[in-house]
Image: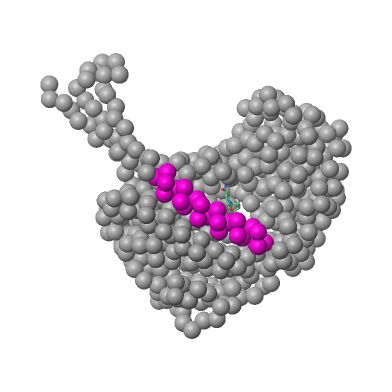
Amino acid sequence: MPADFFNDITVQPHTDSSLACKYFDGKAWQVSRSGKTVSVMSPADASLVGTLQIVTHEEIDEALLKAKKAQIAWEHTPLHARVKIVHLASDWIRQFEEYLTALLMREVGKTHDDAKSEILRTADLMDYFADEAQSIKGETLDSDNFPGFDKGRIALIERAAQGVVLCIAPFNYPINLAASKIAPALLMGNAVVFKPPTQGGIIGVHLTQAFVKAGVPEGVISCLTGGGAEIGEYLVSHPMVDMVAFTGSSETGVAIASKAPMKPLLFECGGNNPSIVLPDADMMLTAREIVKGSFSYAGQRCTAIKYVLATPEVMEKVIPTVEKTMDELIHEGDSRSPETKMVGPVVSEKVAQEIVDVIEEARIQGGVVLRGGTRKGAVVSATLLSNVTPSMRVVSCEIFGPVLSFVTVKDTAEAVSIINGSTYGLQASVFTKDEGTGLVVAGTLNTGTVQINGSPQRGPDHFPFLGIKHSGVGVQGVRYSLEAMSRLRPIVINKPS
Ligand code: NAP
């Protein structure tokens, strides 16, 4: 551990192999008065990565009170000063990239390349947010455009902060999807209460320290740890929370939306993304995108491809090409090994068993397991299922693991109808050499984004990113997130007549 920088985030003494983390109350790193902690075990080797404090409701109240008090002064801090702080925090992340990469590998079971890329992408994203914030501006509107009005008024429309933003991140990109909320919230003048995921909370504590050391003033950021089930509802429904920015499963999203009535929400939830392969598709490109899209980070990506729709003739070509591509690209095993390209462990052995159970359920219902379907510890083997129908759980629910299903349809219209009938609506892909046809099909799909000839993905991060239906609320992407983290404040000047 880089001792000086991160020293105060842990209870002393500690060992590098197990970090007993404190929580940040807005002013200082603290041990909770609850006397309770939660252990974070590594999906890679089941070792203890460290412990997180479980904060009490009283400690939440105290942090929120500090945030409420500090927010107004922070909003009045010149933007250029806020920008400087966010740039400095991203510099710190780059400075400690190697240490943070190793920690992320251990804490959430990422391969070296995946972990490193998340750390560096986080720093890049924060810089981009800081740069873009400087071009967010208000506008003026004249009154006489609207029938019945003369030039008697002018509206000055400013962007104001939302207030105190609760930022809740998921385990699968615990630093990136925390920074993607914290940075725009701070830049737009909000105070942040950060609730990291339990698995991913240790990297979350480190991220908080980067902001603290970069100079975020007292009260403006806090990091409150503890299980979502224990402190989540209290946080989202708290009267001092003005906005909730959340990434996580659709189930949690739906549950917490009901606890935060009338609060602005920015939610990214479950994916369950389909791909339609048309007869003229470039099979090599399609297979490569499908394999990368399905099995990177063991399928634990909201944008992972979960099922492929094609007619019987197309399916006869897609399946063998996907299998061949898997042989080339996938090396299963220990996620800490740099040779492991695609498939490491899922988040826990318990989740691995649940995934294997859903595969078995599909098999009993008539699905054919072409490969995989087993697990060793938390590593689920990359699985292909054919003869699958949309009502099977493996297609109707988001299975957060390395499982890809093939659903045979009679035509494109049936594929579109299956996709539009899903409760999810994050992204979809259409593979065809005819981009005109791709555009037509894309125009009929009810998902946030449609990719033509590419697997679903979040980046580049300045593109709009949104889910519809149970996949999300609101729009993210650099400019869109900055706008969402602020509100319009029109001030109307009534001119003397
Ligand atoms: P999760 O179980 O829903 O948890 C997400 C976050 O919510 C965690 O910080 C969790 O804390 C917290 N939480 C749990 N219950 C809560 C409650 N009642 N009130 C408030 N907070 C609560 O999701 P996950 O397993 O970490 O992440 C995987 C899911 O996220 C997948 O469904 C994936 O598709 C989705 N995701 C979506 C996107 C997107 O952009 N659309 C991106 C990434 C991930 P604890 O960890 O302490 O329980």
Residue at 49% from the left image edge and 41% from the top image edge? 475
Looking at the image, residue 374 sits to the left or right of residue 118; the answer is right
| Above or below for 142 versus 373 | above
Q: Nearer the viewer, residue 45 or 434?
A: 434
> In x, y percent, where is residue 149?
24, 18
Give the overall secondary structure of the magenta segment. helix
Residue at 50% from the left image edge and 64% from the top image edge? 95
Reply yes or no: does residue 14 show up in magenta.
no
Q: Nearer the viewer, residue 427 or 94?
A: 94
Residue at 62% from the left image edge and 44% from the top image edge? 457
> What residue span does the magenta drawing correspond to?
110-133
> In x, y percent, where is residue 123?
50, 55
Which corner quadrant of the image does residue 347 belong to?
A: bottom right
Q: Is residue 274 visible?
A: yes
Tell how many labels: 0
Give the farthest residue toward the bottom: 13
Which corner quadrant of the image does residue 104 belong to?
A: bottom right
Residue at 67% from the left image edge and 34% from the top image edge? 452
> In x, y percent, where is residue 273?
66, 43
Give the farthest residue toward the left: 497
Q: Quadrant of the C terminus?
A: top left
